[in-house]
Amino acid sequence: MPKALSTRIVGGIWWFFTLIIISSYTANLAAFLTVERMESPIDSADDLAKQTKIEYGAVEDGATMTFFKKSKISTYDKMWAFMSSRRQSVLVKSNEEGIQRVLTSDYAFLMESTTIEFVTQRNCNLTQIGGLIDSKGYGVGTPMGMFYVSHLFFVH
């Protein structure tokens, strides 16, 4: 044991530092070994189309269903074939019904990105997988010379 006070303080700090490092390593190792990894078997619409374990659908007669129904892209055409063959079991009447199905069964619900963002920010049990499938823009048609046109485009 060192006799000088300064040597004892440096030695104590060194052992305290060592204790903290070993404790942190042990805690991190325990967390790594016990926490279940959250890996999704599906990362895109293509992955969803290639599998049959997880059913998927959209709101019946909604914009998303119409997109798949009219799509000429092979992946989306294949997805529409799946949805139309199981129409009664995969198409839902409302977004709320689709979200409830996602929460209670192996079901992926396809809907507009803004709605998905809204829902996933309010329910931590839900997540969005993959990016956007399609992108659409909207415009506002007005008569020529309409008095309020300038106010439509400069909303503050």
Image (spheres, rainbow, N blue to C red):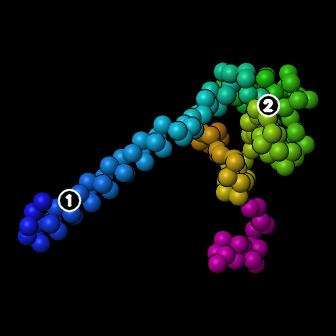
Q: Is residue 92 visible?
A: yes
Quadrant where the C terminus is found in the figure: bottom right
Which SS class for mark 1? helix
Above or below, 97 against 57 in this view is below
Q: Main secondary structure of the magenta part?
A: loop
Whichever of callouts 1 and 2 sits on the residue coming sooner in the sequence is 1
Q: Nearer the viewer, mark 1 or mark 2?
A: 1
Q: Residue shown at 54%/40% (left/top)?
A: 35
Is 36 or 108 nearer to us in this picture? Answer: 36
Where does the magenta region start and end?
136-156
Above or below, 29 against 118 in this view is above
Residue 127 on image: x %, y %: 65, 46
Residue 76 on image: x %, y %: 70, 28
Q: Tally the marks.
A: 2
Which SS class for mark 2? helix
Residue at mark 2: 69
Q: Disc number at residue 14?
A: 1
The stretch drawn in magenta includes residue 148 = yes
